[in-house]
Image (spheres, rainbow, N blue to C red):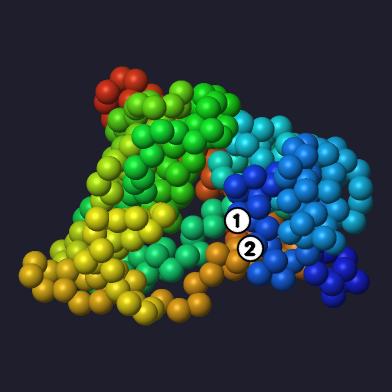
Amino acid sequence: MPLSPDSSTRPVRVGLVGYGSAGRGIHAPLIARAGLELAAVSTSNADRAEQVRSDHPDTGVVPDLEALLGGGGIDLVVLASPSGVHADQAEQVIEAGIPLVVDKPLAVDASRAIEVVDAAARAGVALTVFNNRRFDPEHTALLRVRDEGLVGDIWRAEYRWDRWRPVPKERWREQVPPDEGGGLLLDLQSHLVDQAVVLHGQVESVYAELDERTTVAEDDTFLACHHTSGVVSHLVASSVNGAPGPRARVAGSAGAYIIGRQFDDVSAFTEFENDGDAVGWIVRGDEREPGPVVTGADQADFYRGVALALSSPDTQSAMPVDPTDAVHVLAVIDAARVSAHGRQAVSVITPGQAP
């Protein structure tokens, strides 16, 4: 639902649920950079409540989602809570009639995700999913490589986030099982699958290898995805790889495109780093040239897009990420679990889509 005419002249007032690594480290800075107002934060953790008061003295702090929804004056709710509670909390916000952003993943599986999407549609409440990586320079460069034919017809793409973390962090992501939202398959692979789908079309089938080497959920994952475009993408997310591979490698009929930088700026492929605004390299055997020049790409554009959507006549269609995209991503992840169990490729069936 759009903001009222008088409220459109003031910043969008955001209620943020959760102030951990995602809420404090990612959402709050992007919300501020986009020009939205962090009006309130809900957290039951006393230390994090103090962090909110220190970081944002003018922001209210409440103990839970119910208090946030009952306080009034909120134009948008952002769920930066643990993944396992996203769906239930989203339905609470929808019942309250407030537009919302849900950090990825929307739910722990596609069936639960489509229930949330359908509930929002029935209630007429705008819903979007925080796929912030669509707005960074790397993704922008990859779109240009595809759209400008810089490597010809694309055959195969590799996208990966590798880390060397043999001793897991003491966080819910590493300490809870997949059905409660833990593991890299729901965490980093949600980003990688979304990126691959945006670039190469929906996934028709997937083959997966999933392992829990140091944690109770997946910490070492590989997906081979066959896309509707004919492209095959290999997606790797691992916390136990001591020699990180390139962040992206796209092979085509006229060469390859490679990005060396990893998620946390640790990479064995520093020779593929560019200076300035050029992202990656176009490589043809012994020849290489700088990749596309990207300026102005900013993850805060996600929240700028949300603010614009809230003042548009059709808020849902104007949202920066269609929530049905998140349902398809989870359908790929669901199929990956089946594939890994049976050690064979599995067709992807997305709830809400015609077979």
Query: Which residue is pictured at 77% across the width and 60% down the height?
Result: 56
Quarter of the figure that contains the N terminus? bottom right
Instruction: State whether residue 125 is above or below residue 144.
Output: above
Residue 96 image-quadrant placement: top right
Instruction: State whether residue 164 is above or below residue 140.
Output: above
Query: Which residue is pictured at 75% across the width and 38% down the height?
Result: 45
> Is there any visible trace of residue 267 in the rendered image?
yes
Judged left or right of residue 309, residue 72 is right
Residue 75 image-quadrant placement: bottom right
In the rendered structure, are the residues bearing label 1 and label 2 in contact, judged by CB atoms less than 8 Å apart? yes
Query: Pointer 2: what residue?
Result: 30
Q: Secondary structure at mark 1?
A: helix
Q: Residue furthest left?
A: 286
Quarter of the figure that contains the C terminus? top left
Given the image, on which type of amino acid does mark 2 rest? Leu
> In the rendering, at what x and y percent does residue 157 appear?
27, 53
Who is closer to the viewer here, 123 or 272? Answer: 272
**How dense is the environment of label 1, judged by Cα within 10 Å: few (below 14), some, or many (20 and up)?**
some
Query: Which residue is pictured at 59% across the width and 68% down the height?
Result: 301
> In the rendering, at what x and y percent does residue 280 appear?
29, 69
Residue 57 image-quadrant placement: bottom right
> In the rendering, at what x and y percent does residue 62 appear?
85, 44
Query: Pointer 1: what residue?
Result: 26
Judged left or right of residue 84, residue 347 is left
Q: Residue furthest top?
A: 342
> In the rendering, at what x and y percent does residue 154 appear?
24, 60
